[in-house]
């Protein structure tokens, strides 16, 4: 297939793009490089240095003709979204609207879009199924939910076939590609920075959560397992249909358990500093896995130790990132 990958210079998009190339697809990466890295665009992909907020440039890229789009490009920092919500509505909602306009004009009929468990906010039922009413608690989640709804309406009105994949906590690396965010806010890369001695300690945000050890629980999924789900989703879009799938392992790990796994993998007694809760962090987010298993035929295969181990190897090979 001829595919466009928006955000393909970023963490998850680059790894999915590499996998698509490996199965023989023709891949174009569109990225503004605002948060991504030119070096992360996999060899063999065509690169378009374009911002989705530039509607004319976006339209010109789509006019090249594609069988489908995988849409990863987004702003994705919860804290930043609370401080600057207008960036998030523009960068996620307006940018995605420009993409849909350009796809419609060019007659592109397949879309797989990155969504997030942040759309559920602080859910009433955990494990979280796709039927849980969305109720985001920050502008990031609100903007991503708006994108999912916009896509659903586009499908109904204009016959697009789309799948929104709601990732839980993505981690790990894949060959030459890994996680290099600046600023970095995610737990696993920060734990590994402390293990490498780049920071004096890792902070544990909140030790008074109603969980087994008092720290927040998340559902971690390996980026390679996630990449495989995208390939399955791409082949299952139905004209006029929009489906949502939660992507997680179904198992929750606390912050302390993640740090313990990193101590085992690295052999370093990683220093920890207990700190206050990070505002807006729910106590426990774990995916219900039934719909992705039944509907996509997807089950994650890699463990927390695999994620931490692969991220550690990547970190050691790229101590300063790309
Ligand atoms: N990392 C996670 O744990 C996680 C969890 C849930 C959902 N997601 C979603 O997955 C997607 C990818 O996340 P990531 O961690 O790889 O992020 P990332 O920041 O590494 O990658 C995003 C890429 O999009 C590009 N981009 C942003 N705005 C753009 C624009 N207007 N035009 C063109 N390019 C633009 C950035 O330059 C960057 O390369 C996002 O949509 C995010 O919301 C990520
Ligand atoms: O230095 C740190 C960093 C994080 N944490 C804790 O570790 C857990 C995981 O935090 P991350 O920042 O790694 O991930 P989040 O669960 O906050 O965020 C993830 O889920 C969000 C939805 O809630 C978004 O989709 C986001 O893109 C995705 O990375 C949280 O309880 C957080 O408080 C720490 O204790 N110390």
Image (tube, helix red, strand yellow):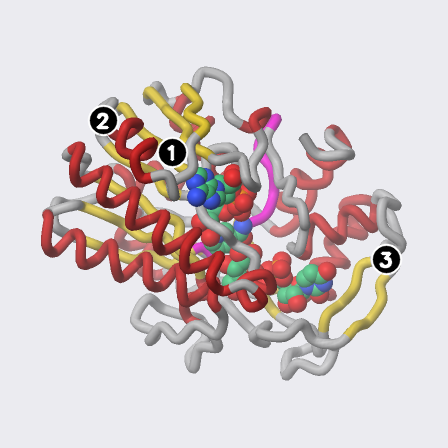
Residue on which disc 3 sits: 201
Give the label, 2 or 1, closer to the camera.
Answer: 2
- Distance Cα–Cα, label 2 vs label 1: 15 Å
Residue on which disc 1 sits: 5
Q: 10 Å neighbourhood of mark 2: few (<14), some, or many (≥20)?
A: some
Percent coordinates x, y for residue 282 in the rendering: 56, 75
* Dot placed on the residue nearer the N-terminal end, 3 or 2: 2
* Dot placed on the residue nearer the N-terminal end, 2 or 1: 1
**Apparent side of residue 308 relative to residue 74 in the rendered image (left or right):** right
**Apparent side of residue 32 relative to residue 39 in the rendered image (left or right):** left
Q: Where is 78 relative to 122, above or below?
A: above
Residue 281 part of the magenta segment: no
Tell me whether circle 1 and circle 3 mark residues in contact (CB < 8 Å).
Answer: no
Near-viewer residue (58 or 142):
58
Q: 10 Å neighbourhood of mark 1: few (<14), some, or many (≥20)?
A: many
Percent coordinates x, y for residue 28 in the rendering: 37, 25
Q: Where is 96 relative to 22, above or below?
A: below
Q: Is residue 226 visible?
A: no
Near-viewer residue (104 or 322):
104
* Label drawn at residue 63: 2
Residue at figure coordinates x 44%, y 77% from the top left: 123
Instruction: Say which element carries label 2.
Output: loop
**Magenta range:** 167-176
- Distance Cα–Cα, label 1 vs label 3: 36 Å
Near-viewer residue (224 or 84):
84
Residue at figure coordinates x 43%, y 20% from the top left: 45
Give the label, 1 or 3, closer to the camera.
Answer: 1
Percent coordinates x, y for residue 201 in the rendering: 86, 57
Residue at figure coordinates x 85%, y 45% from the top left: 198
């Amino acid at each position: 297939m001829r595919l466009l990958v928006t955000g393909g210079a970023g963490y998850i998009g680059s790894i999915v793009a590499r996998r698509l190339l490996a199965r023989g697809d023709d891949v174009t990466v569109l990225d503004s490089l605002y948060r991504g890295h030119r070096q992360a665009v996999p060899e063999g992909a065509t690169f378009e240095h374009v911002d989705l907020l530039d509607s004319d440039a976006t339209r010109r890229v789509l006019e090249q003709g594609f069988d489908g789009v995988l849409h990863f490009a987004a702003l994705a920092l919860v804290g930043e979204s609370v401080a600057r919500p207008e960036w998030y509505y523009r960068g996620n909602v307006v940018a995605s609207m420009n993409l849909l306009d350009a796809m419609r004009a060019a007659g592109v009929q397949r879309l797989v879009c990155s969504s997030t468990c942040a759309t559920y906010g602080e859910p009433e039922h955990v494990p979280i199924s796709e039927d849980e009413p969305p109720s985001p608690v920050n502008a990031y989640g609100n903007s991503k939910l708006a994108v999912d709804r916009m896509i659903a309406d586009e499908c109904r009105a204009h016959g697009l076939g789309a799948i929104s994949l709601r990732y839980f906590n993505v981690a790990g690396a894949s060959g030459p590609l890994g996680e290099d965010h600046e600023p970095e806010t995610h737990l696993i890369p920060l734990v590994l920075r402390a293990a490498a001695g780049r920071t004096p300690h890792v902070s544990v945000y909140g030790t008074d959560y109603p969980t087994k050890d008092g720290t927040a629980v998340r559902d971690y999924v390996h980026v390679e397992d996630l990449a495989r789900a995208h390939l399955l989703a791409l082949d299952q879009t139905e004209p006029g249909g929009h489906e949502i799938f939660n992507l997680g392992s179904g198992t929750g790990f606390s912050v302390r358990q993640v740090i313990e796994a990193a101590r085992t993998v690295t052999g370093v007694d990683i220093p920890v500093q207990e700190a206050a809760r990070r505002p807006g962090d729910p106590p426990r987010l774990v995916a219900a896995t039934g719909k992705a298993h039944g509907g996509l035929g997807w089950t994650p295969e890699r463990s927390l130790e695999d994620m931490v181990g692969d991220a550690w190897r990547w970190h050691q090979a790229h101590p300063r990132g790309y």
